[in-house]
Amino acid sequence: MKAERLQLRRLLLVTRNLPPLQGGMERLNWHLLQQLQRTFEVQAIGPHGAAALSPADTKLREVPLRPLWRFIASAAWCTLIQSTHHRPATYLAGSGLTAPHAWMASRLFGGRCAAYLHGLDISVDHTAYRKLWLPVLRRLDLVIVNSRATAALAVEAGIDPARLHIVHPGTEIPRTSGTDRRSAEGIAFRRRHALGQGPLMLSVGRLTRRKGLLEFIRDELPTVLEAYPEAVLVVAGGVASHALGSEALTPAQLLANTPPAVRERVRFIGEVSDEELSISMFASLVHVFPVRSQRSDPEGFGMVAIEAAAHSLTTVAYASGGVADAVADGVSGILVEPGDSAGFANAVIQAIRNPLPAAPMRVFALQFSWDAFGARVRDLLGRLT
C-alpha cells in the first residue's frame, strides 16, 4: 500500500545542475532524476539544453542558464507555474541554489520541501547568499548531504541535525573487466592521444584551483618523473567556465613556470564521453586526486574516486573534505595528510609500482551503485508526509 501511495505522489525537482553542464553535481542530478522516476510522478525544472540530455520520459521545463540572476528568477517563476498546475506533494532542490524555490512553493501551495547539498552550496562566501539562502536551508523539512564533511558544514551553518541525512553519490559499475580493456581499447586510447608506452596517471575533473592540479604538476610530478621518466599525466576535464564559487584555471596556467621536461609529460584531453572516461581509467595505473582543503570551495565528496575504484584503479588523494568518505585507505586508494607534498609524490610512485588489488576495490565501489543511492533517497523522501 505504501509503495502504491508513493507511485501516485507528485514531485517537482528544481536544479541548475544538469547536462549540458559538466561535473559531478550534474551527473548526480541526472541520476537523481532517473531514480526518482521509479516511484514518483516527477516534473523537473532545469537549464536550457537539459531536456534533450535527460533520462527517458522526463518531463522537464527549461529556463535560461545564464546569467545566474536570470536562471534564479526564471526558475522561481516556473516553480510557481508548475505548482499551480500540478500541486506537487514534494519539492526537491538539486542543490542549495534552488532551495528557496522549493521552500517558497511548499509554503504557498502545501507539500514538503527538501534539498540535496554538495558542500559549496553551504559554504559559499557571498554576503547575499549567506543572508538569504542559508536561513532557507535551515527551514527545509529534509536536508540530504553527500558526505560527513558536508554534514559538518551543514550543522555549523545551523541546520538541525535531526533533519539531516547522509547519502553518498553513486557510480556506474562497468561490466567489462580491466584486463580486457587494457589489452584492447586501452592500447587504442594510448595511440589516440599519443601517450606512449609509459605508466599513465589520470586526473579527472574540471580545471579549478581547488582540485590541486597546479600544485601537483609544479611540486610533485617532477618527483614522480624522476622515478618513472616515461610516465604521463593525462588530464580529462575542461575549464570550469560555468562553475559557481570556483576559481577556474586553463591548461596554460597549470603549466606556467613548469620545466619543459615536465610539460611534455602532461596531456590535456579535455572533456570526454563516459565511454572514453571508462577506457582512460582502465588504461591508467593511478588516479591522482590532489584536492586542496579550501573552506570557501570544499570538495564535498569526490565521486570520481568511486568511479576509479569501480574500474580497479588506485586513487592517491589528500584526506581533505569529503574525499575521506570516497576513498577507503589501503583498499581503494592511498590517503595522504593534507599538505604533505612529498608524501603524495611517494604515494603515487608506490601506486605505480604496486597497484592495490582489484577485487577489494570493486567490492568497495559496489556499495555506491546508483541503484543503492536512489533507494536511499526515495526512502527518505517517502517518509515526508
Image: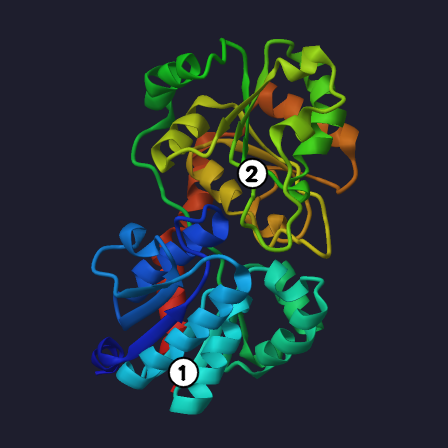
Relative to 7, is 295 on the left or the right?
right
| Residue 342: x %, y % from top left | 78, 28
- Residue named by callout 2: 239
Q: For mark 2, does the 10 Å Cα neighbourhood hold few (<14), some (14 to 19), or many (20 or more) residues?
A: some
Colour scheme in use: rainbow
User: Which label sits on residue 384?
Assistant: 1
Q: Tell me if residue 73 comes above or below residue 314 in the rendering.
A: below
- Which SS class for mark 2? loop
Q: Residue at x 62, y 66 (%)?
A: 151
Residue 116 shows in the view: no
| Residue 281: x %, y % from top left | 45, 29
Q: Quadrant of the N terminus?
A: bottom left
**Front in this rendered view, residue 159 or 167:** 159
Q: Nearer the viewer, mark 2 or mark 1?
A: 2
Q: Quadrant of the C terminus?
A: bottom left
**Front in this rendered view, residue 158 or 183:** 158
Q: Residue at x 43, y 70 (%)?
A: 75
Q: Residue at x 68, y 38 (%)?
A: 212
Q: Quadrant of residue 50?
A: bottom left
Callout 1, which amino acid?
Leu
Q: Quadrant of residue 356?
A: top right
User: Which label sits on residue 53?
Assistant: none
